[in-house]
Image (cartoon, rainbow, N blue to C red):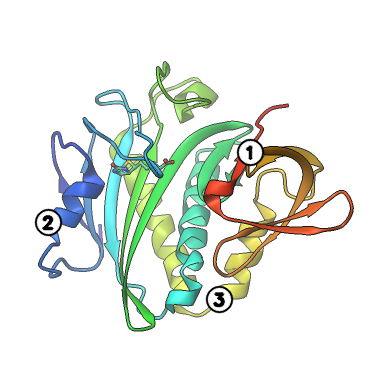
Amino acid sequence: MMPFKIIEVERTASTQSLILEMDREGTMREYTVVVTTDQTSGRGQGKNVWESERGKNLLFSMVLEPICTEASDQFLITQFISLAIVDTLKEYAVEEVRIKWPNDIYIGEKKVCGVLIQNNVIGNQISKTYIGIGINVNQEKFVLAPNPTSIALEKGREYDLREVLESVLERVLVRYKMLKEGKREEIKREYLDLLLYRGEKRKYVYKDKEIEAKIENVNCFGHLILETERGGKIVCELKELRFVIGK
Ligand code: BTN
């Protein structure tokens, strides 16, 4: 599928580690994708692991060169990729797809997809981005993941992993084009409109304290802006905030 070059590997510790290793000379061309169905040591955000039963899910990493994006605007990468994944799930007629800030993809209140983004910055520009995506497609039982779901669990049937990959890549192209055409405001608006719990008064754990607040916005650094009951604003970093899901 143009322009992507898909490299399939039978088994690897992590497609994200593998793609970084394969590109250690920096010569890997844009749109290279490394995909596996057997990831033995999948990496999640921070110190988390990414659980995936062999042969069941879509696990891949790709390299893009969004040189049009300034380092100060790197959250746009998170945003356009999240939109591409939401588009794909909607294509599979999955309903209630939401983005849990910053880039977990949820169906209802369950996580169906996680994204790991690593950017290389030269000067003020993003020279390369390595985007790792894990989508739970056919797995039905999970051992470690806290609140998982899969497309199969939602739809009651199995899907061809290669087809799902091709759908995602097509959607990535469309959204990436928007980024390259400078349609930032549109990307930001659509991302905001899809944020899980936005505008709802909910409980969160912020810096280890329970608070009640509403998600209002995100800033260009990707911080989440919450409005508290008294109308105050909290600007949160990823590590500072925990969602209380499903209550
Ligand atoms: C998260 O939600 O914590 C991010 C999960 C990212 C998982 C994907 S699976 C393919 C790629 N390779 C990895 O080791 N991680 C990412």
* Residue at image coords 54%, 67%: 221
Q: Amino acid at mark 2?
A: Met
Which residue does the numbered mark 2 point to in the structure image? Answer: 22
Decide which of 207, 31 is in the foreground and name it: 207
Residue 35, given in percent of the width and then of the height, sits at 23, 44
- Which of the 4 image quarters holds residue 124? bottom left
Q: Is mark 1 within 8 Å of ligand 1?
A: no
Q: Nearer the viewer, mark 1 or mark 3?
A: 1
| Quadrant where ligand 1 appears | top left
- Earlier sequence position, callout 2 versus callout 1: 2
State the quadrant of the N terminus.
bottom left
Q: Secondary structure at mark 3?
A: loop
Left or right of residue 235, residue 53 in this image: left
Mark 2 burial class by Cα count in 10 Å: few <14, some 14-19, many 20+: few
Vertical arrangement, residue 35 with respect to residue 175, above or below: above
Label 3 or label 2, whichever lies nearer to me, is: 2
